Image (cartoon, rainbow, N blue to C red):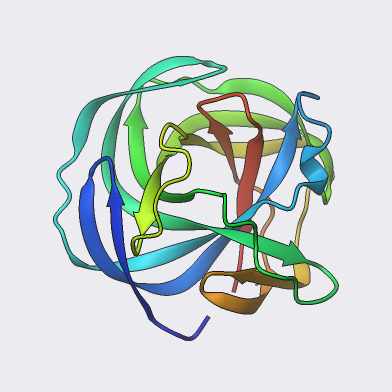
């Protein structure tokens, strides 16, 4: 991604403006513990972009309560680190634009009292494996990007640092064709999964970890 795109981002923590400067992560749907066998073929993907902020000073937020299937936790939200943009993806040819009903998420570095999970079974479009979820590292909240609105205001993602214990989850892939509101692009996915994002409602999971260049 060579173009620079201005964005205004409004979420529960405030308003900032900035410029999208680079794509850093490719996030694909995953079936966790057999809860959603259809997830690996779901069209809903995300690309995580780095945003260079031009206005808005973020003050850390303490006492942020987050609930998912692993419990209820109290976190400190430290600073914005990533913009997740709904994206369609293909390994064979440029895909059409994604469904407009997916939320954008602004992801914040977070720390606090959520413990990890020793092992979860994961299947995505690239393989299967057992993954250990370690401490949470990001809280992603729905964000209004450039006035596009928020389809699901209650949605959140808590992203854990993860480690593959066994299996064949994805490694380097090239090329990967994507399309979203910023236009069509082609990525080389250069790393395997190192984060796992769990919704605060039981609607699925995203295996977040493919770094792109």
Name the residue rendered at 82%, 47% in the picture. 41
Q: For this view, does 88 lie left or right of residue 180?
A: right
Q: Residue furthest top?
A: 71
Name the residue rendered at 81%, 25% in the picture. 34
Q: For this view, does 5 lie left or right of residue 18?
A: right
Q: Position of residue 128 (x, y in %)?
A: 84, 39
Name the residue rendered at 60%, 38% in the picture. 162
Depicted 96 relative to depicted 2: above or below: above
Q: Quadrant of the C terminus?
A: bottom right
> Is residue 124 visible to the viewer in this orientation of the structure?
no
Q: Position of residue 33 (x, y in %)?
A: 76, 23
Name the residue rendered at 27%, 48% in the picture. 79
Asked which quadrant contains residue 189, the reply is bottom right
> Is residue 78 visible to the viewer in this orientation of the structure?
yes
Q: Position of residue 207 (x, y in %)?
A: 65, 44
Asked which quadrant contains residue 145, the reply is bottom left
Depicted 132 relative to depicted 80: above or below: above
Question: In this view of the protein, which residue sits in the foreground, 85 or 169?
Answer: 85
Depicted 50 relative to depicted 32: above or below: below
Count of marks, rendered view: 0
Q: For this view, does 105 lie left or right of residue 172?
A: left
Question: In this view of the protein, which residue sits in the foreground, 190 or 147?
Answer: 147
Q: For this view, does 110 lie left or right of residue 116?
A: left
């Amino acid at each position: 991604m060579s173009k620079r795109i201005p964005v205004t981002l409004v979420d529960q923590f405030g308003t900032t403006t900035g410029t999208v400067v680079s794509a850093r992560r490719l996030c694909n749907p995953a079936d966790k513990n057999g809860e959603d066998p259809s997830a690996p073929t779901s069209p809903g993907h995300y690309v995580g972009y780095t945003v260079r902020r031009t206005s808005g000073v973020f003050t850390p937020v303490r006492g942020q309560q987050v609930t998912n299937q692993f419990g209820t936790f109290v976190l400190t939200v430290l600073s914005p680190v990533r913009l997740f943009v709904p994206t369609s993806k293909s390994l064979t040819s440029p895909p059409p634009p994604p469904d407009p009903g997916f939320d954008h998420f602004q992801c914040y570095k977070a720390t606090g009292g959520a413990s990890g999970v020793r092992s979860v079974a994961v299947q995505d479009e690239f393989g299967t494996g057992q993954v250990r979820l370690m401490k949470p590292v990001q809280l992603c909240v729905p964000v209004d990007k450039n006035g596009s609105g928020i389809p699901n205001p209650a949605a959140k993602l808590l992203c854990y640092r993860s480690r593959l214990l066994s299996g064949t989850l994805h490694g380097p892939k090239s090329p990967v064709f994507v399309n979203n509101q910023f236009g069509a692009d082609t990525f080389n996915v250069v790393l395997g999964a190192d984060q796992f994002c769990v919704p605060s409602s039981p609607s699925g999971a995203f295996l977040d970890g493919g770094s792109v260049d």
